[in-house]
Image (tube, rainbow, N blue to C red):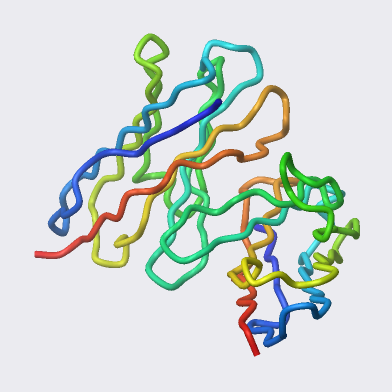
Amino acid sequence: QITLKESGPTLVKPTQTLTLTCTFSGFSLSTSGVAVGWIRQPPGKALEWLALIYWDDDKRYTPSLKTRLTITKDTSKNQVVLTMTNMDPVDTATYYCAHSREYSRQLLDPWGQGTLVTVSS
Amino acid sequence: EIVLTQSPATLSLSPGDRATLSCRASQSVSSYLDWYQQKPGQAPRLLIYEASNRATGIPARFSGSGSGTDFTLTISSLEPEDFAVYFCQQRGNWPITFGQGTRLEIK
């Protein structure tokens, strides 16, 4: 069974850097074709894909946030970390991580439960 | 970036009714269009992948169709647990994008 869980601060101040960790089980990010992605959802709004990292360390970012995002992996710990710099109140959202199975062309399933991050001074 | 437009924004139906949800892409995504269901306070759950394939454990009353730019999610006979928000998502082109959602509410 594949499970993912997001962790990190629930409150950050404007201009600070957000660091979120996705800890997963049931698969390995060293398996060829596997990937983990991050998606966010502002309260009451639509989903927005942020970033994806592959087993071979290839990375993809959404263009509008590319300069602020960094995604990394620690295969030995079964973790993926997303950092977002220069946080703003509009970045207030629930942040999800999701698994992408082998060579599935980024099919995101399943997702973690999400973690709500509020940006406020 | 491919824009996905879902319609209607809200759909009010009764249990037992047939629901038809639409997702239109601003350019072709081939068949790389997925549907997710989201209930309040929960993460999205994959229902349909690649336009017409039911995900594991999804009841047969859910079906998907379409290719290119026009896609449909059909729920043949609504159960009480089906009232939720439905999102479409394309992964045929970077970046991955989502529609704005259709809220399926009880009439």
Q: Position of residue B61 (x, y in %)?
A: 83, 60
Residue A24 or residue B3, whichever sits in front = A24
Residue B43, position as x, y percentages in the image = 48, 52
Judge by depth and name the residue closer to the eye, B42 or A63: B42
Q: Where B65 sits versus A115, above or below? A: below
Q: Is residue A84 above or below residue B27?
A: above
**Vertical arrangement, residue A27 with respect to residue B101, above or below:** above
Tell which residue pokes out farthest to the bottom in this image.
Answer: B107
In the picture shown, does residue A114 fall above or below A93? above
The residue positioned 55% from the left and 25% from the top of the image is: A1
Residue positioned 43% across, 46% down in the render: A96
Q: Residue at x 43, y 73 (%)?
A: A44
Q: Is residue B51 left or right of residue A118?
A: right
Residue placed furthest toward the left: A121
Give the residue at x 13% y 57%.
Answer: A13
Count of numbered badges drawn on the protein: 0
Where residue B71 appears, as percent x and y from the top left, is 84, 64
Quadrant containing the N terminus of chain B in the rendered view: bottom right
From the viewer's perspective, tell me whether residue B68 is left or right of residue A85.
right
